Amino acid sequence: MEFELTSENFESEVLQSEELVLVDFFAPWCGPCMMMMPIIEDICDSDPGFSVGRVNIDDDPELTEKYGVLTVPTLIVFKNGEPAASLTGYHGEEDILNFVKSCE
């Protein structure tokens, strides 16, 4: 399931989650982010065994700064409420799935 993340729901949806959560930090003006959007949606639709959330860096600069996001798109996998790994730039579905699986 894909959901929008904000400072208000980040703790309950990501930090308190008992499963892996892939967080996509994106911006609507970012070409590679928009190219990855359908890939992220396909991953969600495939029931991958982990949650997926998105943070719009323009709408939530606090989270962006807290997790050191300097480039978009940036994907961060959270495990047990902590950032486990990050990946920047455009990536295809197979790369993203392998990235998340490496954090299990």
Image (tube, rainbow, N blue to C red):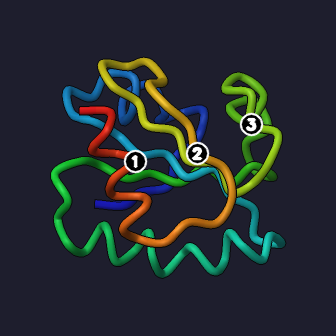
Viewer-nearest of discs 1 and 3 = 1
Between discs 2 and 3, the one toward the N terminus: 3
Give coordinates of residue 89: x percent, y percent: 69, 58
Residue under numbered circle 2: 87
Residue 62 picture location, percent across and down: 75, 30
Q: Please tell me whether mark 3 sits on a helix, a strand or a loop.
A: loop
Q: Please report the residue visible at 74 percent of the width from the left and 27 percent of the height from the top.
A: 68
Residue 67 x/y as whole percent: 67, 26
Q: Is residue 36 left or right of residue 94?
A: right
Q: CA distance from mark 1 to mark 3?
A: 17 Å
Write the residue at 27% across / 29% down. Answer: 17
Answer yes or no: do the residues labelled 2 and 1 have beta carbons within 8 Å? yes
Residue nearest the observer in this picture, 99 or 34:
99
Q: Give left or right: position of 24 versus 95.
A: right
Q: In the image, which is nearer the foreground, mark 2 or mark 3?
A: 2
In this rendering, the count of numbered labels is 3
Residue with the mark numbered 3: 69
Q: Earlier in the sequence, mark 1 or mark 3?
A: 3
Q: Secondary structure at mark 2?
A: strand
As drawn, the label of residue 99 is: 1
Indicate the quadrant where residue 33 lies: bottom right
How much space separates mark 2 and mark 1, taking CA atoms? Answer: 8 Å
Give the residue displayed 68% in from the left and 32% down from the top. Answer: 63
